[in-house]
Amino acid sequence: MKIFKFSNQHIFKSTHFQIIFYMENEILIEYKDVEICRDENIILSGVSFVQHKGEFLYIIGKVGSGKSSLLKTLYCEMPVKNGTARIFDYDLHTIKQKQIPYLRRKVGIVFQDFQLLTDRSVEKNLLFVLNATGWKNKSEMQKRIGDVLLQVDMQNKGYKFPHELSGGEQQRIVIARALLNAPELILADEPTGNLDPETGSKIVQLLQDISETGTSVIMTTHNYNLVQNFPGKVKKCEDGKLLDWDL
């Protein structure tokens, strides 16, 4: 399958190739003057940013600066206070508990520590997610698993168990898992933190390739070399604020 991107715009399909049509100006996330707290402790205040469809955003900063907390607010793992906080069509101040699973189906999450189920194969790890998110048709499930493994270049690893894979391979499987339900947004929390520099670079390149198909990506990192080698929009968590940061 070939993928073509045409100047900011559009997606269409044929039997021979796929052209991904999207409007980069479509806003997926809007935060304005938001406060993020853990219990009574303010982690970040005055948080303001906009994320568009297909955009790649780094959130950089030291360990403990609030990067992961910010990501957790985007899938309602942590609450927000004050200001404007919207993701997709949901207002995070007023979202109902029963709406949260529907929001999360639009978000793929990539963890630093993989969180793969160690007692089953790669394919059964992915099957577990599809079952948990309401898929029923077995042939469609198998096809979807094959598609995402191919997308991350792991199409021959479905029978392997996590302990039989390298760290980089495990992270590719985690990305495949995040892609299963064709999310509009991928949140990658320090996805290279447990990887050597060369393997980490390949993971970032894979995430950038995914963003070029129209899936928005927000990646946290404290590795500034990655940001310089794989440019994107950058925000920095520092001194309790989310700041613009120029390369």
Image (cartoon, helix red, strand yellow):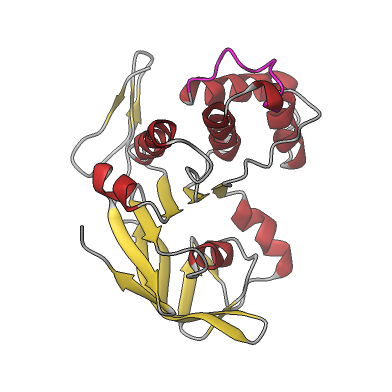
Question: Image height check: is 20 above or below 57?
Answer: above
State the count of labels: 0
The part of the chain drawn in magenta is 153-162
Judge from the rendering whether residue 139 lies leftward or rightward of residue 119; answer left or right: left
- Residue at image location 34% in from the left, 18% down from the top: 17
Name the magenta segment's main secondary structure: loop
Q: Position of residue 37 (x, y in %)?
A: 58, 80
Question: Image height check: is 87 above or below 54?
Answer: below
Judge from the rendering whether residue 233 lies leftward or rightward of residue 125; answer left or right: left
Instruction: Tell me if residue 4 is in the magenta stretch.
Output: no
Quadrant where the N terminus is found in the figure: top left
Quadrant where the C terminus is found in the figure: bottom left
Quadrant in the rendering for residue 171: top right
Question: Image height check: is 33 above or below 180?
Answer: below
- Residue at image location 21% in from the left, 62% down from the top: 246
Quadrant in the rendering for residue 241: bottom left
Q: Nearer the viewer, residue 20 or 44?
A: 44
Task: Look at the image and tell me whether residue 27 can be seen.
Answer: no
Q: Position of residue 99 (x, y in %)?
A: 67, 62
